[in-house]
Image: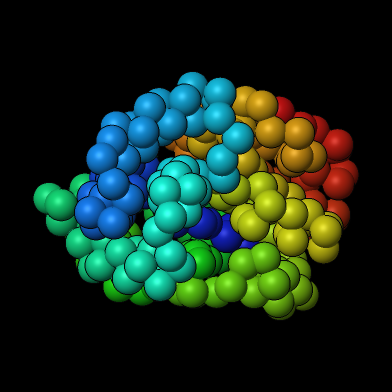
């Protein structure tokens, strides 16, 4: 028996609006004058917890559809923006000390990456961060929430699971429904009504809590931490 920690990528491990801005720039010619300004204004509102979007990609896609951009054009722009991921055209950051954080967690838990995004660009970013080998499993284009449900079902047969992400609907709700623990990070954590085990503005802010979860789960065969203690932050 071994615990598992499932990490989302965009908005969780990868932070910053660089890829979202790349997506917006690629859409802009079809969206008309003022589109990029509207995107920046809504991203600022989202970051401040004042906008009801799922994430930055939802901001851009919603504004583009309102401007009359069709689904095919949005998909093309998204694919092109993912090809730019991690370059100067679509820069991303991550938490300080990510490698040491994952190395420490890996002593207690199986680390899994599960994202709806395609592999393109992500492998390059993980390599640049020096953390690709920290993950026992890498799942791309997994099709959350349904795909995450299947993954959590499998992982739960081996022990407790903590699912970490920035979109409660996709990254956390399927895990919670199966009795796993959850951690909500990012701009929505301060105001989301979702019931979660842990919440905080970033992965870095929850580092100690996540390390405690891993150590506790590894030393116990009881129910996951949230179920056993009812803690929620």
Q: Residue at x 31, y 40 (%)?
A: 35
Q: Is residue 76 above or below residue 175?
A: below
Q: Nearer the viewer, residue 201 or 213?
A: 201
Residue 73: x and y, percent? 35, 67
Residue 193: x and y, percent? 76, 34
Q: Residue at x 43, y 65 (%)?
A: 70
Q: Residue furthest left?
A: 88
- Quadrant in which the N terminus is drawn: bottom right
Q: Residue at x 83, y 59 (%)?
A: 177
Residue 127: x and y, percent? 23, 64
Task: Count numbered badges in the picture.
Answer: 0
Q: Residue at x 62, y 41 (%)?
A: 184
Residue 179: x and y, percent? 83, 58
Q: Is residue 223 above or below residue 158?
A: above
Residue 109 sits in which quadrant? Answer: bottom right
Answer whether residue 122 is visible to the viewer in this image. Answer: no
Answer whether residue 149 is visible to the viewer in this image. Answer: yes
Q: Nearer the viewer, residue 126 or 135?
A: 126
Q: Is residue 80 above or below residue 209?
A: below
- Quadrant in which the C terminus is drawn: top right
Residue 6 sits in which quadrant? Answer: bottom right
Tell me if 200 is positioned left or right of 59 in this view: right
Q: Nearer the viewer, residue 157 or 13?
A: 13
Color scheme of the displayed model: rainbow
Tell me if 184 is positioned left or right of 74 in this view: right
Tell me if 139 is positioned left or right of 34 in this view: right
Tell me if 79 is positioned left or right of 196 in this view: left
């Amino acid at each position: 028996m071994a615990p598992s920690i499932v990490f989302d990528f965009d908005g969780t491990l990868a932070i910053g609006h660089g890829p979202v801005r790349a997506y917006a720039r690629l859409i802009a010619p079809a969206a008309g004058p003022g589109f990029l300004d509207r995107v920046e204004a809504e991203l600022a509102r989202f970051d401040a917890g004042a906008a009801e979007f799922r994430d930055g990609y939802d901001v851009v896609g919603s504004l583009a559809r309102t401007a009359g951009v069709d689904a095919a054009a949005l998909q093309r722009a998204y694919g092109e923006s993912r090809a730019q991921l991690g370059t100067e055209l679509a820069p991303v950051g991550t938490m300080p000390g990510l490698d040491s954080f994952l190395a420490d967690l890996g002593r207690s838990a199986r680390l899994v990456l599960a994202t709806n995004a395609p592999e393109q660009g992500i492998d390059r970013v993980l390599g640049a961060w020096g953390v690709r080998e920290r993950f026992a499993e890498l799942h791309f284009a997994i099709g959350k929430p349904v795909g995450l449900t299947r993954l959590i079902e499998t992982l739960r047969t081996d022990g407790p699971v903590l699912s970490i992400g920035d979109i409660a609907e996709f990254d956390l709700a399927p895990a919670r429904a199966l009795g796993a623990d959850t951690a909500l990070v990012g701009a929505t954590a301060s105001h989301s009504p979702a019931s979660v085990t842990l919440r905080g503005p970033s992965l870095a802010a929850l580092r100690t809590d996540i390390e405690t979860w891993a150590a506790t789960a590894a030393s116990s065969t009881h129910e996951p931490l949230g179920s056993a203690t009812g803690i929620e932050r």
